Amino acid sequence: MLIVFVVLTVVAVLVIALVTIGRLTYRLEDEPPTSVYDLEEAVEFVADRLPEEMTAELTYDDVRALLLWHLDYLEDRGVARDFGENDTSGPLVAAEDEGLAYVLGKAAEGGLELDDVWVVRVLDASGEYLEAIGAIGGQVPEPPDPSASS
């Protein structure tokens, strides 16, 4: 009798575990993977992709500052968020030219005198980093033109 009770208990525990794991797997299957932005890794990644003439005059601190300002812009737009915050409101979009203007403005405010082309190159390499860690999704389709349905 004791053996039957032990076997039934083991079977019940296994069924509960399998059902729980199955439900969790099903729920997580629909969620996009979380991308974690590592600032120091991003600085190294971006610096490695810049041309030599830029790296001769642009310091790691300059790259770090530009990346932080770009992150500030993305966070202001709601595209980036602190680790642990959950927002599943759907795809979020940030215009590249707005981000560039924001970073250029912050650089000017901070007294960082850099060539605008350098800032563009840093932000382009930052975009490559974001793609590499899976933080950037596919291109969002254009909305249909309402005047074309006449």
Image: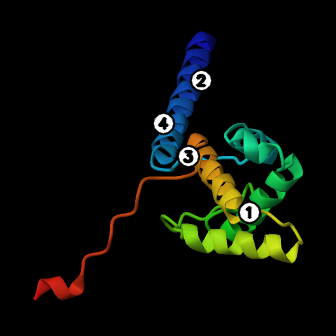
* Mark 4 closeness class: few <14, some 14–19, many ≥20 residues within 10 Å: few
Of labels 1 and 4, earlier in sequence is 4
Seen from the viewer's position, the closer of residues 99 and 92 is: 99
Q: Which mark is residue 131?
A: 3
Report whether residue 38 is seen: no
Question: Which dot marks residue 22?
Answer: 4
Secondary structure under tag 1 reads loop
Task: List x then y, in percent, for residue 53.
Answer: 74, 44
Query: How far apart in space, not on screen, are marks 1 and 2 (Cα)?
Result: 71 Å
Q: Which residue appears at 59% of the width and 27% of the height?
A: 13
Mark 3 → mark 2, Cα distance in angstroms: 48 Å
Quarter of the picture holding the N terminus? top right
Along the line of sight, which residue is nearer the eye, 35 or 84? 35
Image depth: mark 1 or mark 3 in front:
1
Q: Position of residue 33 (x, y in %)?
A: 56, 45
Q: Earlier in the sequence, mark 4 or mark 2?
A: 2
Residue 124 drawn above or below residue 48: below
- Nearer the camera: disc 1 or disc 2: 1
Query: If you read the primary sequence from the N terminus, does the residue marked by circle 1 or circle 2 appear first?
Result: 2
Where 32 falls versus 144 (above or below)?
A: above
Residue 70 position within the rendered picture, expressed as x and y whole percent measured from the top left? 71, 63
- Disc nearest the viewer among 4 and 2: 4
Per the image, the residue denoted by label 1 is 115
For mark 3, give the secondary structure.
helix
Give the residue type that dot 3 points to: Glu
Count of numbered circles on the image: 4
Query: Residue at 69% of width from left, 43% of height from top?
Result: 50
The answer to whether residue 90 shows anywhere in this view is yes
